[in-house]
Structures are given as structure tokens and as C-alpha cells.
Amino acid sequence: MGAGRLTARFGPWQVQTALDNIADVSITGPYTFVKTAGPAHLSLADRGLTFATNGHRGVCLAMVEPIRGIDPFGLLRHPNLTLTVADCDGLVDSVQGR
């Protein structure tokens, strides 16, 4: 995070958004193996995007305006992004304290 923006990278995928575009942030988990194994995951239920490396705990960021992510052309937009990070509480505090 920096200059009022959040950037998240996961393998070849990258997401960027203004911090003002984040409507809500919450700690989530645990997750099933299917949601964390392999590459970035697209939820068929709500088009949410998940960048996960573990099934224990993560941070869900709900967006004001859906963001580009898994689709390289930007046609598919994601209303939320879930990240598994080393410091979930720190990420939540940083986003809330923007």
C-alpha cells in the first residue's frame, strides 16, 4: 500500500485499487482446500477474487466499484478480493486507518 492505493500480486495476477474504493474490510477463514490450492480463484457465486496461499485466515476487501483482476481484458470485474497475508490484523488496521 502506498499513495492511497492498494496493490496485490499473486503469481501473474495483479490487482490495484484506490483505498477509497474499499467499502469494507474483514478477517475471514478458515477456507476449504479447494479455495486455496493452485492459482487465483474466481467465485462463481459472486465473481469475488481470491489470492490465497493458506486455508487458515485472510482478509476480505469489499469494493465500492468492482475491480479488474483475473481477466486480462478487464471485462470481468470483482466486487471483493480475499487475500491471505502474513499479518491480517495489520492489513485491516492499515485499510481502516487510511
Image (spheres, rainbow, N blue to C red):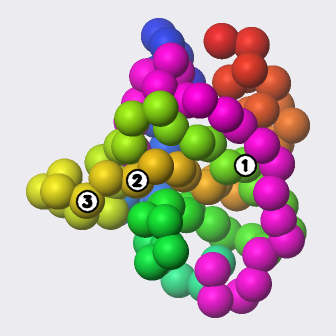
Element type at mark 1: strand
Q: Earlier in the sequence, mark 2 or mark 1?
A: 1
Residue topped by disc 1: 59
For the point 45% across and 72% down, the residue is: 42
Report which residue position mark 3 lands on. 76
For the C terminus, the image quarter is top right
Which residue lies most toward the left here? 73
- Residue 15 in the magenta stretch? The answer is yes
Magenta stretch: give its range.
14-35
Residue under the image location 53 percent in, 50 percent down: 80
For this view, does 16 lie left or right of residue 89?
left
Disc 1 packing (10 Å; few <14; some 14–19; many ≥20)? many
Q: What secondary structure is marked by label 3?
A: loop
* Label 2 sits on residue: 78
Whole-percent x and y of residue 23?
59, 29
Along the viewing direction, whichever of 79 and 1 lies nearer the viewer: 79
Q: Quadrant of the N terminus?
A: top right
Element on which disc 2 rests:
strand
* Amino acid on which the number 2 mark rests in the picture: His
Q: Disc 3 vs disc 2: Cβ atoms closer than 8 Å?
A: yes
Query: Taking the image as drawn, is residue 86 in sight?
Result: no
Q: How far apart are labels 2 and 1 at the CA level?
A: 15 Å
Residue at position x 50%, y 18% from top? 20
Q: Amino acid at mark 1?
A: Val
Q: Position of residue 56 (x, y in %)?
A: 85, 69
